[in-house]
Amino acid sequence: MKFGIFFEMSTPRPFTTEVQSAVFHNALEQARLADELGFDCVWCVEHHFLEEYSHSSAPEVVLAAVAAQTERIRIGHGAVVCVPEMNHPIRVAERCAVLDIVSRGRLEVGTARSSTWTELGGFNVDPDRTKKTWDEFVRVLPKMWTQEHFSYDGLSFSMPERNVLPKPVQQPHPPMWVTVTSPGTELDAAERGLGCLGVAAAGYAEQERRTKEYYRRIESCDPVGAVVTSAVSTLNFLYCHEDPKVAARTGMGMVGTFGLANSHLMWTREAYPTRAYQSLGNLAPKVDRGKSGGPGDAYGIPEGICVGDPDIIVAALKRWESLGLTGINFLLNGLEVVPQEQVLASMRLFAKEVMPQFREPGKAGA
Amino acid sequence: MLIGTADVRDLVPAPPTLEAFATEPVPLPGAAVLQIISEIRVSGREASLPPGLHPTNPPSVVFQFWDCPESPWGPFRLAQGRVACRSGLRPRGFVQGCVTESAAAAEALRSQWGFPATIGDVVVDRGYDRVRAEVAIGGRTVLAFTGRDPDPLGNGDIAFTATVALANTPRGLRLVQIDCDYAAHRAERVRPVIDAFEPGAWLPASIALTWPISAAVAIADITLEPHRYVSKPDELAFTGTETL
């Protein structure tokens, strides 16, 4: 089981220079500590316009800083939004290659298409086309990284023969992932030989079903790249404290605040009727029927959450591991409700008491 | 803005009064439903949502038209203006204006369900090449819409969120959740064009449309479901919700 940390750069109001700066620099400090403690990967998401929830609009810049300030931990560029209005595929290939170089071959590349109208609308993206452009991106990126002479005549872009430079350090190219919010996207990942990077809460039973189907399908995949990434990771929260009551009070405050900020987003399906978005993201999946749950429901607290003392967290992780997960990525804070010193203490306690339970003796994180 | 800030007393000048909560479903079969969604200025959102509701980003308004050929109150047409919001973590639309040309429907929808219905003229005109809809109050057009170039959708592709309405209820002034079930038989997306919009006569004057997002029309069997939840308008839904 590999453990990552996952940055959304959620930011409380007021959005002063000091507050915004603290969010980013706290994250960098967490990345440095994660590197020292043996965490496996730092992921930094790409989002746009998501007030409070995520101010991580330039992850490649953050990750360049992380790469420069760390030695060992892998660098998760994830996920890059694969729609041309936001990121031209040539630029994605170039940026990723440079990140792989400056990190000395530590890059993981996540791909996504965005789930919110907030973002797609802001870039005037046609939601009907994002699945198509994502598929086009994931097929061309490995070729741009591996072919000296690349040309393309496609749906969202075309180009005459050029050498896309530089090439990445990792050979044949960095591992590639797909973020999975909507049920079914894990199958898209499997069929293309891509890692499944879960970013929305799924309960144990649902995750087990998805994971089994993913591994079954990837056996017969038609890989888009020159290497298959067969792995399933999910997103979780982390707050570890010796006293479970303190952990619950602090950790659940973080979870609730983050969930509330998440609920403010305008999910594409809510705003724009289309066959291309069948899920309301992290909102109630059956919300378009009258039988949806009540406003006072404590819905939103995911099953198997890693908030508690080390024993509680070990138990939750063992359960996730038994379902076939290869990794868990942790959100460490939400809108800075947990003071930075406590976040760092939580990470240290996790590394001391929990992480060794999932490592082979004498082996640090891969 | 994590939580609504508007003063409850300013939101709906004359809230409907529910004598009792609805306990039986009411079917509205074969209705034409037109849903138009547009982004609005932040100021309109700030003026519209009480502390019991949460905002969306971007702020938006949902206009929903019903053309019901059959109901317990006879045929009627209805137009609602709702500000998109969250109640707890749930997506909802806070209805701030509601117009129907049927006095019987207006009375029933106000007194039995909590819609702030007023009398006006509502037009829903569906064609194969376009959909046209209009709301007029006192002979003055307050919303005119054209949806162009209908494009077929799957019957389940339109997301309808539940409504909340501010009403005087047997439990006091409450946000009343109005659940509707929509079983669509045919659905189409149209390209939205807002031809005219004057909010003051039926919606908060601060609601200014900035960017039309989408519009869709469906033929659907609507069921007005029994009331299930109310919540206190000045308290977070997590603690202020009462299950009926």
Image (spheres, rainbow, N blue to C red):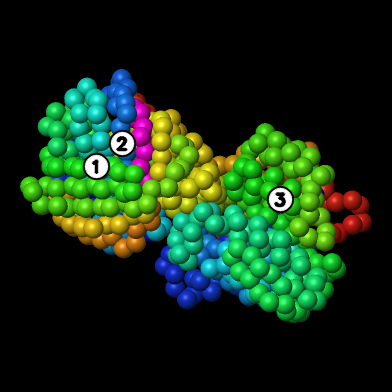
Cα separation, mark 1 vs mark 2, equals: 8 Å
Residue A91 image point, x, y percent:
65, 74
Q: Chain of mark 3?
A: A
Q: Amino acid at mark 1?
A: Val
Residue at horizontal 68 percent and vertical 55 percent from the top: A178
| Residue B14 visible to the viewer | no
Residue at horizontal 60 percent and vertical 48 percent from the top: A181
Which residue, given by chain and number where applicable, does mark 2 sit on?
B32
Q: Chain of mark 2?
A: B
Q: Amino acid at mark 2?
A: Ala
| Cβ atoms at labels 1 and 2 below 8 Å apart | yes
Cα separation, mark 2 vs mark 3, equals: 39 Å
Of the numbered discs in the image, which one, if any, rests on residue A189?
3
SS at mark 3?
Answer: helix
Please name the predominant secondary structure of the magenta segment in the image. Answer: strand
Residue at horizontal 46 percent and vertical 43 percent from the top: B153
Cα separation, mark 3 vs mark 1, equals: 44 Å
Which residue, given by chain and number where applicable, does mark 1 sit on?
B124
Q: Is residue A107 above or below residue A315?
A: below
Residue B222's image quarter? Answer: top left
> Which residue is at the front of the view, A297 or B84?
B84
Please state the extent of the stretch shown in magenta in the rendering. Answer: B216-224
Q: Chain of mark 1?
A: B
Crowding near the residue tagged with mark 2, few <14, some 14–19, many ≥20 C-alpha atoms within 10 Å: many
